[in-house]
Amino acid sequence: MATVPDTDTPSPRLPPRRRLGVGAVIVLVLLAFAVTVGIGIFRGATGAETVTASSTPAPDGSGAPAAGVYVHVAGAVRAAGLYRLEVGDRVADAIARAGGFADDAARDGVNLARTVTDGEQIVVPVVGAEPTTAAASGSAAAAGPLDLNTATREQLDALPRIGPALADRILAWREENGRFTSVDDLGSVPGIGDKMLASLRDLVRV
């Protein structure tokens, strides 16, 4: 009787170190899965969820939220009210947030290029109304015409159609020439023409 050769040869076994490595990986995978499932069950039971704060990074790249400014837009705009703007925004941005000019707005009555300050009120006059100086930084407008020889940069900046750059030119002219002897001296300041001088004549004095 022929002898049948034994074909059941034992399968090669992994070295002990490799078996330990594979086993450790399996245990870690199962443990991570169990932790994930546990966190999901806990959140479902408590109703907790992760909320990511949405904020605008600071311009200096520090990662801190950028501070905003609040301005009150009033007068001849479509939606007067209190609005939050970003630091560095201008009057044009504030009026845009208020829905834009109303049909009867005197658009030349405000300086669109001026940078807004926190707490100020921007009043857009209607056509035919006398221009007024808007209250800045939460303070009321000064009563009566503004004295050109004692006015600060902020007070000059608050005048209609006068922005920071033009306010600096007025102060520079005053420093170079001693003082204003007449309102007409404003016409000697670079950037102030006859039309602007006429609009400022009732708002300033010497």
Image (spheres, rainbow, N blue to C red):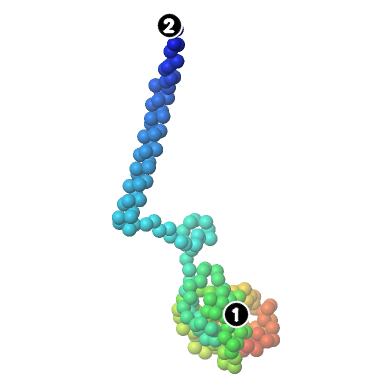
Q: Residues within 10 Å of mark 1 (few under 14, many from 20)?
A: many
Return the mark for residue 111: 1
Answer yes or no: do the residues labelled 2 and 1 have beta carbons within 8 Å? no
Q: What is the spatial separation of the Cα atoms under label 2 and label 1, in whole angstroms?
A: 116 Å
Task: Tell me the SS state at disc 1.
Answer: loop
Using the image as rendered, state which of residue 137 and residue 156 is in the foreground: 137
The residue that appears at 39% across and 34% down in the rendered structure is 26
Q: Quadrant of the N terminus?
A: top left
Rate crowding at label 2 as few (under 14), some (14 to 19) or many (20 or more) other CA atoms within 10 Å: few
User: Could you tell me if residue 98 is visible in this image?
Assistant: yes
Name the residue furthest front: 1
- Say which of 52 and 187 sits in front: 52
Residue shown at 62% from the left, 84% from the top: 108
The location of residue 107, given as percent across then percent down, is: 61, 84
Question: Between residues 1 and 143, which one lies in front from this camera angle?
Answer: 1
Looking at the picture, how far across and down is residue 6, in whole percent? 43, 13
* Amino acid identity at mark 2: Met
* Mark 2 or mark 1: whose residue is earlier in sequence: 2
Residue 11: image tag: none
Residue plotted at (43% across, 58% down)? 52
**Three-letter code, disc 1:** Asn
**Is residue 175 visible in this depiction of the protein?**
no
Left or right, 35 with respect to 75, comes to left
Location of mark 2 (residue):
1
